[in-house]
Amino acid sequence: MIDWHRLFGLALMDFFTGSPFVVELEKDLSLKKQLLDVVVLRRLPGEFSGTLPDGFESLCEHNLLSYKSLWEPLDDWAVDELLGHYVNYRKQAGSEGSGLLPHERFGLYAVSTRFPQKLSEQVVLDGQQPGVYSVRWGTHRVAVLVLSEMPPEERNAVWLMFSAVRDKVVAGAAWYCSRTGDMSTLMNGLFERYQLEGVMPYTWEDFRRDYAREHLDRLTPEERLRGLPPEERLRGLPPEERLRGLSTEERLQGLSQDEIEIYLAKLKGQRRQRKR
């Protein structure tokens, strides 16, 4: 089963597909294995097409993310660890002989599913907006994103899917529009994890079926039939309903002359029998 950290990284990787940013997962920053959860890295010039989720409005060139799932604490050690990753990453990011990149080109994000209560008792979390805080850590500013507190808005879909709040998870999954196509692997893994945690009582396939049923009345007839093969569209209709609205020529299309003549002969025979 895919773990929480990889699911979170895969979701962000999909979200930034086709944008000036790329996402790197579990980046190894030392000879002794130390993995930074996610790096959102600007690779191309230009603006992000669409609306970024809350807390991501001012992305830098290098954005380092530490992620804590439902039962993992975002505490002082976790923030210390993020700063350690930043130091190692910054040493590696500069080209040979050019020295360290300016610190302004780096963004630090501590992302937590639930509010970091213990951390808030140790340091001041400066609230910027619902779900978004800022904390001073030495000479650095770290953005603290609390996913369970994010407003249930479409722009926050990628956050809501990891909020561990049932209604927000459902809304996020419904709103999220994949940039890479099929999201079934990610969504199946996500819903399986929530089932284990007791947050979601059903699977991704159950969700898709229920969502389609609840929103069927909003679709046009053409949208409802889109993707169905002809035989599925006609299933359950009596013959007269299938042929209604067709001209004689349209009804006979696909039949050979021999088939038509055989059928006409059969009709004539039935009429003669009725006259007797």
Image (spheres, rainbow, N blue to C red):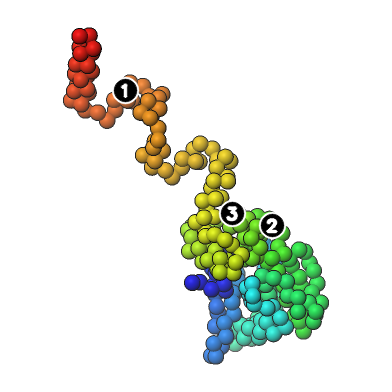
Amino acid type for the residue under numbered disc 1 = Glu
> Marks 2 and 3: CB-CB under 8 Å?
no
> Marks 1 and 3: CB-CB under 8 Å?
no
Q: Residue furthest front?
A: 276
Identify the image quadrant of residue 220.
Answer: top right
Q: Secondary structure at mark 3?
A: helix
Name the disc covering residue 174, or none.
3
Q: Residue at x 51, y 51 (%)?
A: 209
The image position of residue 141, as x and y in percent, is 75, 77
Q: State whether residue 147 appears in this view.
A: yes
Q: Residue at x 64, y 65 (%)?
A: 164
The alpha-carbon separation of the residues under discs 2 and 3 comes to 12 Å
Q: Secondary structure at mark 1?
A: helix
Q: State whether residue 62 appears in this view.
A: no
Amino acid type for the residue under numbered disc 2 = Pro
Q: Which residue is mark 2?
A: 152
Return the disc, 1 or 3, that comes first in the chain's sequence: 3
Return the disc, 1 or 2, that comes first in the chain's sequence: 2
The image position of residue 15, as x and y in percent, is 57, 62
Q: On the rendered structure, is 56 left or right of 29? A: right
Q: Which residue is mark 1?
A: 249
Identify the image quadrant of residue 67.
Answer: bottom right
Q: Residue at x 79, y 82 (%)?
A: 122
The alpha-carbon separation of the residues under discs 1 and 2 comes to 55 Å
Q: Nearer the viewer, residue 222 or 271?
A: 271
235 lies above or below 73:
above
Q: Nearer the viewer, residue 273 or 260?
A: 273
Name the disc covering residue 48, or none.
none
Amino acid type for the residue under numbered disc 3 = Ala
